Image: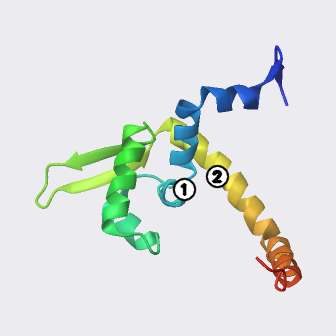
Amino acid sequence: MLKQGNTSVSEQVMAEGCPVREVLDRVAGKWSILIVVAAAQGPIRFTELERSIEGISRRMLTLTLRNLERDGLMVRRVYPTVPPKVEYELTPIARELHRSLVTLTDWAGKHRHTIAAARRAYDEGHEHVPA
């Protein structure tokens, strides 16, 4: 852990609070991650996103896309056609985020069986413990 004076960088981040925490909350959200991964191959239409992300409602997709756009992670393009064609594309900083997410998802895939076994062992050891 890096130190600056008597305070670690992670302690400074927690002390600064809101700005960093807000960004982490936004990009670490389940739907944000899935949208960034789904949009990584290039421009994608709303309906394509909706079909590719299992379980997301239209409202949640719309809200998450707006938040990603507001945070500078997604660009929304509207084409003057009838009906209007709308595409979403990752910004350069979102592409950087995507690389980190790939590392994280690769790690999760690699260790999913170990984690599942640890959960089973934990649950079995805590079944009879009174609350």
Rendering coords of residue 82 (x, y %): 10, 59
Please give left or right for residue 63 compared with residue 126 in the image.
Answer: left
Quarter of the rendering containing residue 46: bottom left
Quarter of the rendering containing residue 68: top left
Q: Residue at x 74, y 68 (%)?
A: 109
Tag shown at residue 89:
none
Rendering coords of residue 16 (x, y %): 61, 26
Please give left or right for residue 7 compared with residue 105 in the image.
Answer: right
Assess disc 2: are there few (<14), some (14-19) or many (≥20) residues with their C-alpha within 10 Å of its C-alpha: some
**Identity, as a three-letter code, of the amino acid under mark 1:** Ile
Q: Residue at x 48, y 60 (%)?
A: 31
Assess disc 1: are there few (<14), some (14-19) or many (≥20) residues with their C-alpha within 10 Å of its C-alpha: some
Q: Which element type, helix, strand or loop, lies under badge 1?
A: helix
Please give left or right for residue 123 compared with residue 27 in the image.
Answer: right
Q: Residue at x 58, y 38 (%)?
A: 21
Contact between labelled residues 1 and 2, with CB atoms less than 8 Å apart: yes
Q: Which element type, helix, strand or loop, lies under badge 2?
A: helix
The quarter of the rendered structure image containing the C terminus is bottom right
Per the model, the C-alpha gap separating discs 2 and 1 is: 7 Å
Name above or below for residue 81 compared with residue 17: below
Rendering coords of residue 115 (x, y %): 81, 71
Rendering coords of residue 105 (x, y %): 69, 60
In the rendered picture of this protein, how many numbered marks are placed on residues? 2
Please give left or right for residue 3 compared with residue 35 in the image.
Answer: right
Indicate which disc, 2 or 1, sits on the residue closer to the N terminus: 1
**Farthest top residue?**
5
**Identity, as a three-letter code, of the amino acid under mark 2:** Leu
Q: Nearer the viewer, residue 38 or 58?
A: 58
* Residue tagged 1: 33
Q: Residue at x 31, y 67 (%)?
A: 58
Quarter of the rendering containing residue 96: top right
* Residue tagged 2: 101
